Amino acid sequence: MSKKVIVALSGGVDSSVAALILKQQGYHVIGIFMKNWHDESVTISNECPWLEDSNDALIISEKLGIPFQVIDLSKEYKKRIVDYMFQEYKDGRTPNPDILCNKEIKFDIFLSKAESLGVDYIATGHYCRKKESKKGNKIIYKLLEGKDKTKDQSYFLCQLNQIQLSKVLFPIGDLKKTDVRKIANENSLITANKKDSQGLCFVGKIKLPEFLQQKLKIKKGKIIKVAPEKKFFKKVLKNNKVENSLKSFVEKYKYSESDGEMIGYHNGAHFFTIGQRKGLQIGGFKNPLFVIEIDIKKNIIYVGEGKNHPGLYRQGLLIKHNDIHWVRPDLKIDLNSSEKILARIRYRQPLQKAEIFRVQEGILLIFNKKQMAISSGQFAAWYKGKELIGSGVIH
């Protein structure tokens, strides 16, 4: 008897080809589209992309001859993703809803619903791979980068655990995007040349400031421009047992109003993120202005001129104890130990050489080279070779 698998059909080419491949491999495939947004109290955009996407998913299911269903997860999505986004921005942090969406919606609620239907696996159109190995009598599930380096999405899955990995298939992980489109064209799938979706996970493209302004109040504040030579540090670690030399790598720049000149006003510090260039609406400078620090309490944003401003760069970051996640729990490092790894702090960033140190407060991740716009609330993910082994929320 063939194994049952539910494919999360998004209405895009990747999940369409994932379903096709599984069907060809002899699985009993079921297509399900997740409806995650219809909250009229917050408008995403004037368009309604989920209607078109769900219709495309239905057409693909009919083409492949597989059962199809739409499930409504909008209540859970609002509670776990949208409310979280608003709170994070309100607190002056920069969330990553795509990672939380995979952790909380696709590989938690959706997976549970799939299991209640008696299926063996769920499958997605992510560009990543899963491998299995054995340690004694235990099966270890490895999350690997996708073969297509330009499309690798392992970073978005950095919060998955061993149980979730045991239940998921990634049918297109060994393919390049060009191959996926070719397969779709050869099999006359209507999504073959459909543009990739952009923006918020499962929702589509949004104008973030307009989105946030529906829940977060406009609050006029100062924009302070800081000269590059101004360097003031704020310690982010308090434990004296950590060597001072190690502490210095995770220090943040700390500015006050007297450290620069006021050059304009903004509509609320919570609408901005570290490293942001657009939306300041201030001209007249030789080089672009970048946000280098946000003071939520005083409602001030500090900016620096040019991409090389020292306030944009740090060599390390802290992940607090409760925010550490190991995809491979068997590879955890012990207290007061360290390990050389590769890491990234954003999607599509080339992997960077780094080292993780296990300290009392959590994990210090120290890069070989300084990194631009390390932002509180974002996720850092670390790898051994091509395998993603752990991640955490940046403090």
Image (cartoon, rainbow, N blue to C red):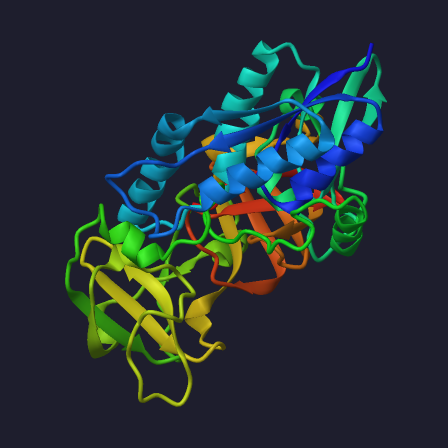
Frontmost residue, 332 versus 70: 70
Frontmost residue, 273 versus 118: 118
Q: Is 118 placed left or right of 146 in the picture?
A: left
Q: Is 80 placed left or right of 165 in the picture?
A: left
Q: Is 264 placed left or right of 144 in the picture?
A: left
Q: Is residue 143 visible?
A: no
Q: Position of residue 40 (x, y in %)?
A: 26, 39
Q: Position of residue 123 (x, y in %)?
A: 68, 29
Frontmost residue, 20 versus 307: 20
Quarter location, residue 276? bottom left
Name the residue at 35% across, 33% down: 78
Name the quarter where the C terminus is drawn. Answer: top left
Q: Position of residue 140 (x, y in %)?
A: 76, 23
Name the residue at 43% across, 34% down: 36
Q: Position of residue 373 (x, y in %)?
A: 47, 62
Name the quarter where the N terminus is drawn. Answer: top right
Q: Is residue 170 above or below residue 364?
A: above
Q: Is residue 241 above or below residue 46?
A: above
